[in-house]
Image (cartoon, coloured by chain):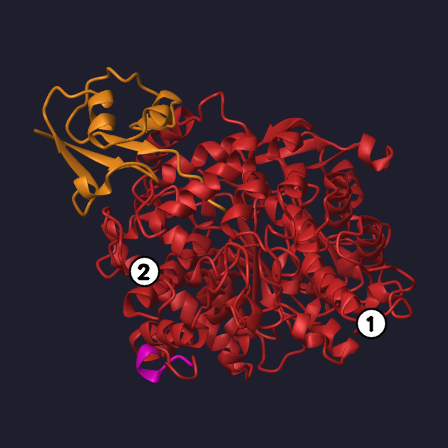
Chain colours: A orange, B red
Amino acid sequence: MISIRVYPGPFGKRDLLDDDGFLQIEDGSTVGDLLKAMGIPRIVYNMGFYGLNYKKEPLDKRLSDGDTLSFIAPLAGG
Amino acid sequence: MKGYIGKALFVDLSTGEFRDEVVPDEVYESFLSGVGLGAYYLYRNIPQGADPLGEDNMLGFVSGLLTGTGSVVTGRWLAVGKSPITGGWGDSNCGGNLSPAIKRSGYDGIFFRGISRNPVYLYVDDNGPRLMDAGFLWGKDTVESEELLLEIHGGSRKVAVAVIGQAGEKRSLIAGISNDKGRMAGRSGLGAVMGSKKLKAVVLAGTGKIEPHNREEILKITKEYSDKVKNVKLPGMVKGSMLPMASRLMEKAGGLMPQDGMMSIPMMKKWGTIFSNTFGLPSGDAPVKNWGGSILDYHFSSYRNMNPDRIIEREERKYHCYSCVIGCGGVCNISDVTGGKFETSHKPEYETVNSFGALLLNESLDSIYYINEIMNRAGMDTISAGNTIGFAIECYENGTITRDDTDGLELTWGNTGAIIALAEKMINREGFGDVLADGVKPAAERIGKNSYMYAIDAGGQEPGMHDPRLDPILGIHFSADPTPGRHTVGAGLYYNYMRLWDFVSWAPKISSRGSKGNKYEATDETALKSVANSCIKQILDGSGGCLFALISGVGNWRLFDYLNAATGWEKTPDEYMEIGKRMQTLRQMFNVREGIDPMSFRMHKRIAGDPPMREGPLKGRTVPIEDMMKDHWKYFGWDGETGKPLGETMQALDFARLLNME
């Protein structure tokens, strides 16, 4: 198993994460596998609203232990 | 070589004398630089009871400890002084290119006292400081003045200018100080202090070096952060028209969960703060109709005019403040909408758009371009001016004032022509504009009757354009801070993005599974969050850092590591937070010494939800603000009832010794 930090934003099953935001997933899993496991709506990830380690990566990109996968998080501010 | 210069300049405008002072290392280790250095000197040198517009008040221009060290997003400076708005501690924060120029001129801070007989400006280069005649600039706006000064002193050199416009000259209490032709240190009324001293400008042309302890380590952190900022992007198909939907989605998911602050950066890169123009309204973050309305009064057909895509269509170029890798600034062409009067203008910030848009039910974006430019040129704070016009409109709509009072203006909601005319009158202190030119609190005192009901303020300061009924921790900072009404001090939302709990032992952790806590209750956890916000904000303002970098997360923009690399101190995050607590406590001590009752800074009851809204996204929401303020103070080690720092806290922070050092 590998450990991935996930910031799902308003999407997906947050109860799969531990308190620190990590998801345990099988070694060899891809970005797409993780998004499916988290229950992120397909339309959201197909539109590319996520970043893997803050980069745009394809859904078949293989994950590595310690990666961060996060969704766009708009912040009101001035 | 610790990132700071180690010297401050003192200028007596009454006598024309200059004095350099070596700042002991211990001052930096105890208060950092920037706002901390300012608080250290002003607390010791402004006599109790000094008139904010008198000879004894001091006005400081301070740079950040990290500015110029090779760190990024650390180019902010602050103006500091006793505020003529609150009667207490005042500071105001601004970007642009002034902050490094202060240090290149050989100082971490430049402090003025006294009043000049005639208008002057300070010029500093490698040959030292000089006071020069500013008679030819008096009466000119900030942009004209800066252009003239650059013509005289610029050439090929890097020269930075801070200057006041007509608002500061006329001592409007909502006047700010401009640099980079219209960026504004707008809060606390410090432009009026500068005007009262007959100090038109500060021109900095030094070429000194800024040396950190470990530049290599700083550059390593810089590269890591800059790469992330460069890589993180919005999908190309994202449009401004999607923002209202995104706002609803985020709000529906609830606010009590950690967010990846780095993922807020793409919005800033694409639009700057104006993405909030339409993002902030559906959730209730953006105030409407003088804080008494909602999107039911200013619905989509109104606010779609403020779509940020429309504004960036006018952007001739984007720009970055000094050392910034995000680059939220822009210059817009506004020639067509101002009848050729002005060619270009800084892209209006969200705060300005909402202050003169939704807050007044004004649907004309074109009018906002114009107002933004005349306010920047006059050096008047748009947040305060918009709030004050909202107050006046509500007075008019409710019959408290009539056309006889308003010089014939029909001050109804959304009357664009009247709003523009009133903004111009305020700048010129002409007729009814003179009644309003000092902000809502003096205006309510002048109008009398029941007008105070419509004067939305906190301690005299008009609040920034974010609603505490959506984010109660924001309300704590509006009310319990020594500089009230400020949206940049802290918020529950900011806390969730910064992830301080990964570094600071006492900062409450937010579970990634989401918290079941009720944010509308005063709890110990809420108080600890607001205390953490206040402490980190002081560290930020001592460093010259930008809030938007901080919000991208302390694990990404590594503020504590930057400070250690710059200074060689090797302090822990907890030790830095203790410095932040000392800085905040000193600002509060300043206010208490002035006889201010901290509870009197409590925000207007309307924005605490008393009475609650009857419709809209904030319907029924009430913030128990007094209880929250008391808890906040208690966790700072201040008296929970009065907000006065306790003797034991002042002792633990070593004030008796530090404030009496020679």
* B297 in relation to B328, above or below: below
* A70 in relation to B251, above or below: above
In this view, the residue in front, B221 or B204, is B221
Residue A3, position in %: x, y?
Answer: 14, 33
Q: Are marks 1 and 2 in contact (CB under 8 Å)?
A: no
| The magenta stretch spans residue B648 | yes
> Which stretch did the figure color magenta?
B644-649
User: Which residue position holds label 1?
Assistant: B401
Element assignment for label 1: loop
* B648 in relation to B209, above or below: below
Q: On what subunit does the disc labeled 1 rest? A: B
* CA neighbours of label 1 inside 10 A, class few (<14), some (14 to 19), many (20+): some
The CA distance from mark 1 to mark 2 is 49 Å
Q: Residue at x 79, y 74 (%)?
A: B400
Q: Is residue B15 visible?
A: yes
Mark nearest the camera among 1 and 2 is 1
Q: Amino acid at mark 1?
A: Ile
Residue B33, position in %: x, y?
Answer: 45, 56
User: Which residue position holds label 2?
Assistant: B577
Q: Which mark is residue B286?
A: none
